[in-house]
Image (cartoon, helix red, strand yellow):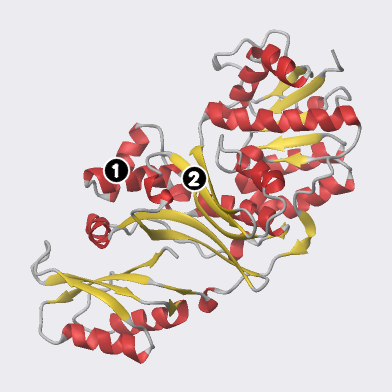
Amino acid sequence: MEKAINVGIVGMGVVGTGVAKIILNQGHLLSERTGKRFVLKTAVDLDWEQERGVDLAGVQTTTDFEALVTDPEIDVVVETVGGIEPAFTMVRRALATGKHVVTANKALLAMKGRTLFQEAEDHGVELRFEASVGGGIPIIKSLREGLVANKIMNMYGIINGTSNYILTRMHREGLDFDAALREAQIQGFAEADPTLDVGGGDAAHKLTILASLAAGGFVDFNAIPVEGITELTTLDIDFAKNFGYVVKLLAIYRFNEEKLDLRVHPTLVPGDHLLAAVNNELNAVFITGDYVGDTMFYGPGAGQTPTASAIVSDLVDLASILQAEKVASIPTINPEKTVNLFSLEEITNRFYLRLFTLDQPGILAQIAGVFGKYGISISSVVQLETHGDENYVPIVLLTHEASEKAMFKAMMAIKEFPFVRPDILRLRLFK
């Protein structure tokens, strides 16, 4: 048996405990499959009173991170603390002491990744992050290795399980947003404060990582336009169904002319597309490579065991590097390369526009006139006679391809009409 790979875990919450369970309970299987022995030497957490459902006898348990990071026998540090601080300080310190690091922390990588990858490069160590996107789906490894021969042309991700669960319940059961959110919280698929999930921020963190990896350089998280699902109503879901679409919160990557179009927003996906069938808390990433064509990766996007499984896959990769006494030859993200993005004003889409107007003759013609003024062509119009509010009726329009800039100007002009309610909703159609 080869030399043991000594692992230290920082943060023994749900995911950290899952990693400990796999190392301690699946050790024989890992050794059998890899020829390497993995030892959980140290675990760091601030609270050792709670029951974790794992036997840590023989593991050094401590509240002192320095005891772990300065231990010369520790080969790999697994960070499962979450958030930006103190995780950033801990990961940077571990890299600076010459230790490889594995993390599932998508917010940390999206916000501080450039600094951390530079730190890893400066000290000749690896920073691995398979579990940061897609839970148990091997999407990071697929981009790094399986699709390495391809320029990634398009990537569409359903990469937030909370939002996908809510939208699924709205589609299937006719629940409104608030009711679907409450159900997601009861089922454990949504946090008490779900803002990061339903607002699109979590998906944007993950898109930052995927886009940086696909493009080979760092993407500025703050430059990605983000919209969530909180404004969607059952009316919008029903209209989407009638038009043959399913609404999904998509993380979008499109490559064109050496620049990237990156966005997160609810999108009308054709009902016959593979992504339309991804339901409940499951995740999927649909990728088009210039040589491989279309591929899709599908599976559980979160949870203790899928995420821990992805972390252990990184540990196995690092074990090979450690025993070969060299850093992996396959690069991840170049910390010195900056990726250029299209501004939202440069992007074109087909649009869904839902608005409420007074029930008066000639209104539709005036709205159509505004669209014509800004060069936007309407492909479909649906107007209901009644809907709850007896004073206003809903109108939904689908457009042909138009610029975001033109649509924004048209919306602002329409909002000035005294017969239009201010709660106009704009969605994009999948393309």
Q: Position of residue 413 (x, y in %)?
A: 33, 85
Decide if residue 423 is on the left or right side of residue 221: left
Decide if residue 191 is on the left or right side of residue 98: left
Q: Position of residue 284 (x, y in %)?
A: 49, 45
The one of 196 and 215 positioned closer to us in this rendering: 215
Residue 175 visible (yes or no): yes
Among the 4 quarters of the image, the one containing residue 44: top right
Q: Find disc 1 in the rendering and name its residue.
A: 169
The local crowd at label 2, few if under 14, some if 14 to 19, many if 20 or more residues have their Cα within 10 Å, is many
For the residue marked with disc 1, what is the amino acid? Arg
Image vertical order of residue 202 relative to residue 425, above or below: above
Q: Identify the residue at image location x=90%, y=36%.
A: 326
For the residue marked with disc 2, what is the amino acid? Ala
The local crowd at label 1, few if under 14, some if 14 to 19, many if 20 or more residues have their Cα within 10 Å, is many
Q: Identify the residue at image location x=62%, y=10%.
A: 55
Q: Find disc 2 in the rendering and name its residue.
A: 284
Residue 60 visible (yes or no): no
Q: Where is residue 48 in the image (x, y as percent from the top left)?
A: 62, 18
